[in-house]
Image (tube, coloured by chain):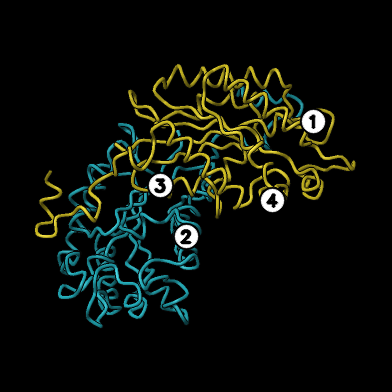
Chain colours: A cyan, B yellow
Amino acid sequence: MRPKVVLFGDSITEECFVEGGWGSALANHFSRTADVVLRGYSGYNTRWALKIVERAMDGICAVGDQPLALTVFFGANDASLPDRSSGFQHVPLLEYQGNLRSIISYFRDCWPATKIVLITPPPIDEDGRLRNPFEDNASDLPERTNDSACAYAKACLAVAAECNVPVIDICSKMQEYPDWQKSFLRDGLHLTAVGSRMLFEELVKKLRDLALSLETLPADQPLYSDIDRKDALKTFEK
Amino acid sequence: MRPKVVLFGDSITEECFVEGGWGSALANHFSRTADVVLRGYSGYNTRWALKIVERAMDGICAVGDQPLALTVFFGANDASLPDRSSGFQHVPLLEYQGNLRSIISYFRDCWPATKIVLITPPPIDEDGRLRNPFEDNASDLPERTNDSACAYAKACLAVAAECNVPVIDICSKMQEYPDWQKSFLRDGLHLTAVGSRMLFEELVKKLRDLALSLETLPADQPLYSDIDRKDALKTFEK
């Protein structure tokens, strides 16, 4: 039975199978070893995620089975400023942390063997947000700011440390590079193919730290190179 | 519980989550409606596929559950010429047809409600094969020919008609276009992003004919646009 890696998050997860996306890259990486299961919910914050998590995960695993790993990638919507055009999605910082803790607890209860990996929200390019508004935005103020995104990323890191959960700090990682605003973010928030590549590589590294890699996970069914050249069918009788 | 579309085939399936791949495109298309489950086995012909099919499908569905749809995409390896450098993969034409029938029967027995879609092998660009040999090929003859691929494609169409299974004739479809050899095939056999795009579009059309589309399948959890702006949590209580 092929093991599973579940991706749970908002639109940055929902769209991760787009061309050049980090979900496709992960599915391609594990093409003979693990199923990558997409559970991305565009626009969702952690408050709404908590309401759907049970139904969202229904049927992913048979009774007794658990995913190998699971990414939890929320915060970009929670960090929308409450008094601006996406205020509807805003969740206060302390509630965001509490919700992350509840999501972690939920998964630890139902899938104790599953390795959870938190991902911080990405940084925000405010210029990109003003040029690509999601909602009517008559003001000249972006609905998300980088300061707010960074505060939520820090809060996510704190929850990860407190709960002893591995975390990818994509917010800081991206800002190490010049022109991170346009290189990694296509509309100030969602990832370009280059940004997706970075997240994919960080995720593969993190999974490897958790002993989940192409070296440790068995391939599903004999590889072509392992099929007996003199008697192929013998390979399949094993 | 989110329904599933299973992709069963050889390397053209195994690599379908590569950048621009038809599997990624399908997963992205159904990102909120269905899970795309990859079961591609590089190098495999139908003889070997029959040996592993039961194990390959193990655990995809819970007891009582069945995939929505399943693609069966074999023949490119069966069609390797028996006396050339990939002769090891060759399966005689009549056996290929018998194996396809057995694969269809297998799925009809265990998943009677699942819509099976056959895909013919793609055409072969012999020049591309000579430039990109998989095995040592000291001769100046390609290990696969377009004549052979087309014969296996025709044989696949015949089985589809006989078994009343929908089929995508990607072999003929590609050859309708000028420069199909280089536009659609990157090494004379495997698909370019343009070739993948064609297969993705044909598959979406075929699934739509079977009443499986974004219009007929429900989205998993409320869409952002359907969340009550005045009382978001009310949406999730339904």
Q: Are marks 3 and 1 in contact (CB under 8 Å)?
A: no
The quarter of the picture where the N terminus of chain A appears is top left
Type of amino acid at the residue the image marks with label 2: Phe
Say left or right for B205 vs B182: left
Camera-nearest residue between B29 and B133: B29
| Disc nearest the viewer among 3 and 4 | 4
Q: Chain of mark 4?
A: B
**Secondary structure beneath disc 1?**
loop
Check whether the beta carbons of the residues at disc 2 and disc 3 lie within 8 A of each other.
Answer: no
Q: What residue is disc 4 on?
A: B186
Q: Are the residues at dot 4 and dot 1 in contact (C-beta closer than 8 Å)? A: no
Q: Of the residues under marks 4 and 1, which one precedes in the sequence?
A: 1
Foreground mark, 2 or 1, reads: 1
Disc 2 + disc 4, Cβ < 8 Å: no
Residue B216 vertical placement versus B114 (above, below): below
Chain label for disc 3: A
Residue behind mark 1: B81
Mark 3, residue position: A5
* Residue positioned 42% across, 74% down in the render: A174
Left or right: B10 in relation to A35: right
Residue position for label 2: A200
Q: Against A133, is A219 above or below?
A: above
- Marks 2 and 4 sit apart, C-alpha to C-alpha, by 25 Å
Q: Chain of mark 1?
A: B
Mark 3–mark 4 contact, CB under 8 Å? no
- Nearer the observer, disc 2 or disc 4? 4
Residues behind callouts 2 and 4 on a single chain: no
Decide: is A218 above or below B156. below
Q: Earlier in the sequence, mark 2 or mark 3?
A: 3
> Which residue type carries mark 4?
Arg
| Distance Cα–Cα, label 3 vs label 1 | 39 Å
